Image: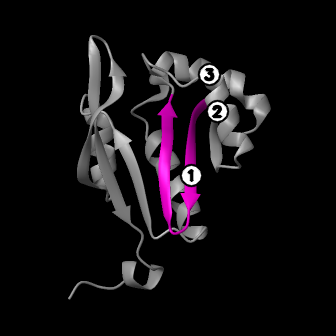
């Protein structure tokens, strides 16, 4: 993702979320040199992901696919790319938060090896109040261990 992409990213963000990030948040992430990637479709950007990495931990800050493009595996591809980037930069684990009201995302994260490790009460803005966040994590094992045959 580049600064020139932010307007198009915002169009997707506004379609996807009732409480979207602002353009300023995306630009702050770019200024901080967070790994941020866009997924390009035939008509432009259809998704994006933002990751922070510090020490040996990575945090998926945002993964989003345009609602009209969801259900085609784009989110999975983008999430896998972010995990590969985290691993390549030395992260040993990846964290993320997800709304309990987003069962499709929860299922994707479970399917990709993330496990619930806790909750953050009243983390997200929601209509009529606040919504908890499910905190999930995935350990990034060394490639040799990940490819070991079952015992």
Contact between labelled residues 1 and 2, with CB atoms less than 8 Å apart: no
Image position, residue 90 (x, y; %)? 56, 71
The residue that label 3 is drawn on is 10
In the visual, does 22 lie left or right of 77? right
* SS under mark 2: helix
In the visual, does 114 lie left or right of 70? left
Alpha-carbon span between mark 1 and mark 3: 19 Å
Q: Is residue 48 magenta?
A: yes
Alpha-carbon span between mark 3 and mark 2: 9 Å
Query: Callout 2: few (<14), some (14-19), or many (20+) C-alpha neighbours within 10 Å?
Result: many
As drawn, the residue found furthest toward the left would be: 151
* SS under mark 1: strand
* Residue 130, picture quadrant: top left
The label nearer to you, 3 versus 2, is 2
Q: Which span of residues is magenta-colored?
A: 43-65
The label nearer to you, 1 versus 3, is 1
Question: How many numbered discs?
Answer: 3
Residue at the spot x=66%, y=26% of the render? 24
Image position, residue 39 (x, y; %)? 61, 39
The residue that label 1 is drawn on is 52
Q: Is residue 137 magenta?
A: no
Alpha-carbon span between mark 2 and mark 1: 12 Å
The residue that label 2 is drawn on is 26
* Residue 145, picture quadrant: bottom left
């Amino acid at each position: 993702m580049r600064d020139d992409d932010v307007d198009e990213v915002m169009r997707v963000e506004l379609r996807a979320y009732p409480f979207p990030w602002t353009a300023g948040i995306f630009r702050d992430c770019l200024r901080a040199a967070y790994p941020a990637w866009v997924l390009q479709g035939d008509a432009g950007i259809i998704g994006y992901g933002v990751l922070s990495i510090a020490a040996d931990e990575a945090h998926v800050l945002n993964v989003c696919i345009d609602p009209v493009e969801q259900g085609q595996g784009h989110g999975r591809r983008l999430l896998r790319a972010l995990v590969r980037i985290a691993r390549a930069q030395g992260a040993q684990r990846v964290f993320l938060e997800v709304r309990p009201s987003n069962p499709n995302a929860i299922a994707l994260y479970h399917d990709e090896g993330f496990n619930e490790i806790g909750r953050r009460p009243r983390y997200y803005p929601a209509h009529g109040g606040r919504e908890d966040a499910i905190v999930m994590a995935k350990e990034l094992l060394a490639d040799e261990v990940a490819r070991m045959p079952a015992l």
